Each structure stands twice: as structure tokens, then as C-alpha cells.
Image (cartoon, rainbow, N blue to C red):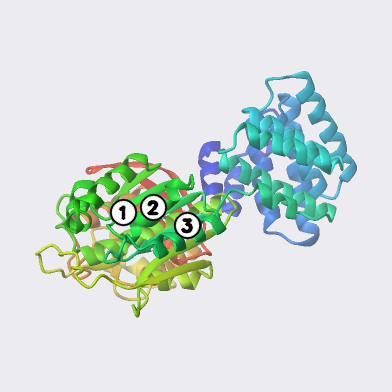
Amino acid sequence: MTPLHQILSIARAGNPARAWALFQSAGWDARADDRKALTLKGRLLKDQAKVADGAERTRLYGEAAEAYAAAAVLERDSYPLINAAALALLGGKPERARSLAQETLALLESDPDQGENAYWRAATRAEALLLLGDETGARAALADGIAKLPQAWEDHAATIGQFALILAEQGKDATWLDRHRPPPSLYFSGIIGLDETDPAILQDIDEIIAREKPGFGFGALAAGADILIAEALHKAGAELHVILPYPVDRFRDLSVAPFGDHWVARFDALIAVAAKLDVLTELPDEEEPSIAVAVELADLVAVGQSIRNAVVLQSKPKALTITGVGDQPRGQHLVWADTGHDQFSISVARKVDHQSVTAPSNEETREISAILWVAGLDQDGLSSAPGAGDGFESAGDAHYQISTDPAALLSTGLSLLHHDADRRVSLLIDIMDPRQPAASLLEQASDMARASRGESILTDYKSAMVLRSQSAEQVIEEIGELQTAHGPLSLWSVA
């Protein structure tokens, strides 16, 4: 019997149909005496309803409502009860929704421990009031909950998404939700060789940040534009998420210290206040990549992080860059432009005496490339697989392909899974020589594929963020951690 947590993981990975098939085949859908099974049943039916249309959509929402209601009967809890109420409305039963909403309010009044925390208690009350037509009371209760936990951003986003569905079903305006929406996520970047004492540059940065009000900043901390923008973000109260292409000391030596001791102090101060620091480390048998390609990869990761954060929080991703007058757009700026999200640019004159960053001395033969690994499929099976194409190398009972076009390999991997969901596939994006990748990279790709149960492509965090920077269509979710010979690896799914 497939365990519930495994089915939930598949649903979160973006494959609700497959999750539901496993749920049914294991007999969980017949379990009326298991609260967890009933709650998951409601979740799976709701997921299916979101992508259905017409009468089928209404039916699925109604069945999801009854699954949650049955779970609430087994254990009186406001979470399944309020979900049952909202889904009953979406399932075309407004009176049933009102009755369940009244039950929810009564339960909240009788049990002060209801709700995971103060925010969820208030948000649940607000949702019940909204279902009962008391929009004024709902607005006040939601504002009260947000005031209690103002930085519970993901919780706020989940509530806003649910309220938007309810208001749409009620035919009411939902724009009032925007004032409660989490703030935008800002990807920042720019040149090193600028005049940091020019008040016009600082004024332009401050004006954009004051106008756009980002709550999160994602980028590196090279001397110059990076540090100026990061300082302005920190001053405005935004969370700093720093992504470096090298370990901190090495990055400081390459991209900060050569431009003056005053930059070093500012860099160290920002590292100290960063909410999160990510370093794109190399595996043991890899040489240090040149700074140009290392920075390019880190930039793509930062772009993906900012977009993902905005998607999770149901807010907006934005970008701010400082360029030299007459500069051609860099690769990551073109990637961002393709997303269609807001991008702001400040053009400044470069310092006359500016010296470029000195790259490591090794002759670089590597570039950002991807490895698509397919495990447990012999040559005959691969040859007959629709969408596999040519160019695969053999490695025991596995096959892999390397390309400087990650999007093309992603398409191949998804095509393989479309025709056989049980195939074990991984996709790894890193800096490598596509003709002779490091053995550790091939090993990592192999480890991820062998950890797969099928259903989706497995990848690591860095690769997931690069894919998110370039694709808005795929569902990309964190699913756990994989222990490897080189330490733990954050595991993500792409479906």
C-alpha cells in the first residue's frame, strides 16, 4: 500500500492525477475512518477541481468538501471544517457552505486553542465570515490576523488565494486583498566600476525601492552596484537573500577587496545582516570556474529565487539593474525580459580608472550545461522511447545526454515521463565541459535519478532555480533531501 506521505509528495510535485490514481489503488479513498486519509482525499480532489471545467469542476469541489467535512466529524478541528465550507461554496452548495461556516465560528468560540497559531485562528474566522456574507467582518478579522504575525508571508499568501476563489464565486470585487498581499521580490544586479559617491545614483535607487516597496532582495554583493542596492534594500527593511558564485572569502578577494577597503567593510556588514546566504560551491574534483561563467550561473539562480519567492507568496517579481552607458544587455537581463516581469534600469557613467575583475588563471573550457540522466532503461528501451532522440551516452544500465541548452533537455525528459511515468529521470545544471564533465557531476545526476520513484524529473536546488528563471510552465517543488557521497543534497521535482 502506497503510504499517504508519498502520495502527498507526488501531489505537491505537480502530478495530482497520478497521486489520485495511487490513492485509489491503495484503497485510501474507501477509508471513512481515517482522518488523515480523508483530509488528503479532500486535498487531491481540490487539486483536480482546479484544473477541471464546468460540471466536472463543480462535482470535484463538492466531493472535496464532503471529504473534509467527514474528517472534521472524526476530529473536531477548524482546518478541515473551514476547507469543507469553502469547497461547498465552490461545489455549488451555498447553503451547505453557510452551515459549515457557522459550525466553524462556533468551534472557534468554544475552543481557544483552535488554529495552528494566532494568525490562522484569525484567518479562519475571517474566511467563515466571508462565506457568511459579512465582508466587513472578514476584512477586519484578516487585518487582525496579519497584525499578529505580520511576516508569516506564506500563510498570508495561502489565505489570499483562498479568499480570491471565494470572492470570485460570490461575484464580488477582490481588489481589497491586494493591500494584504506580501511585498514584491526584487532581483538586483549591476556594474562594479561606478562612482559610488554620486548622489544621483543613490537617489535613483532609493526612489525605485520606495515606489516598488520590495520586501525581499536577491543578488550578489560585488563592489559597486550590488552593494549600493543591497544597502538601500536593507535600509528600507527588505530581507536580503545573497547568492555568491564562490565561497565568501574567495568572492571578497575577487569582487570586493580589489576596489577598496571601504567596500570590504560594507560587504561584511551586509553578509552579517543577510536573511539567507547561498554559495554555489564546487564538487571535489572540479576546478574553480572563471568569474564570468560563475557569475552568470549565480545570476540565473538569483533570478529563479526571486521569481519562485514571488510565486509562493502570490506577489510580484521585479528586477533592478545598474548598467554602464552604452552597455549591451547581459544574459540574465535578456532572460528576465523574456519573463515579462517589471524590470528597472539605471544607466551610469563608468569610472575612467576602473579595472575589471581578474579572472582565475586556468584556461576556461567550461560553460553552463545540463546533464539529463535516465536510469534503469536499456538501449533498446531508450531507442524506442518517443522523444528520446539521439545523443545519449551509456553508463551501465543508465543513459545520459549533455547539452548547453537546459531547456531542450528538460523537454526531452518531460517527454520521456509523459510516455512512461515510472521512468527515473534527473536533470543537473552546472558549470562543466560538455565534452568531458567532472565525474562527480555524473555521479550526482546518477544519484538523483536512482532516488526517483518516477512521476517527475528530479533535480537539485541550484538547477531548480535556473529552471525557474527560464520556465513559467513547470511545477517545481522541493521534496526532500538526498544523502550522497559528497554530503546532503536538496532534492526538487520538476513536472
Q: Find residue 287 and report its horizontal and vertical position in percent.
A: 14, 58
Q: Nearer the viewer, residue 484 or 78?
A: 78
- In the image: residue 93, left or right of residue 216: right
Location of mark 3 (residue): 206
Q: Find residue 352 and report its horizontal and vertical position in percent.
A: 22, 73
Mark 1 Cα-neighbour bin, 10 Å: few <14, some 14–19, many ≥20: many
Q: Find residue 397 and report its horizontal and vertical position in percent.
A: 28, 58
Q: Nearer the viewer, residue 183 or 70?
A: 183
Location of mark 1 (residue): 221
- Residue 104 lies in quadrant: top right
Using the image, determine if residue 78 lies above or below residue 354.
above
Q: Are marks 2 and 1 in contact (CB under 8 Å)?
A: yes
Q: For residue 368, which numbered disc appears in the image?
A: none
Q: Tell me which amino acid carries mark 2.
A: Ala
Using the image, determine if residue 141 lies above or below residue 236.
above
Helix, strand or loop for disc 1: loop
Of tags 2 and 3, which is closer to the observer? 3
Find the distance from the CA under tag 2 to the CA under tag 3.
11 Å
Mark 2 or 1 closer to N-term? 1
Location of mark 2 (residue): 230
- In the image: residue 237, left or right of residue 261: right
Helix, strand or loop for disc 2: helix
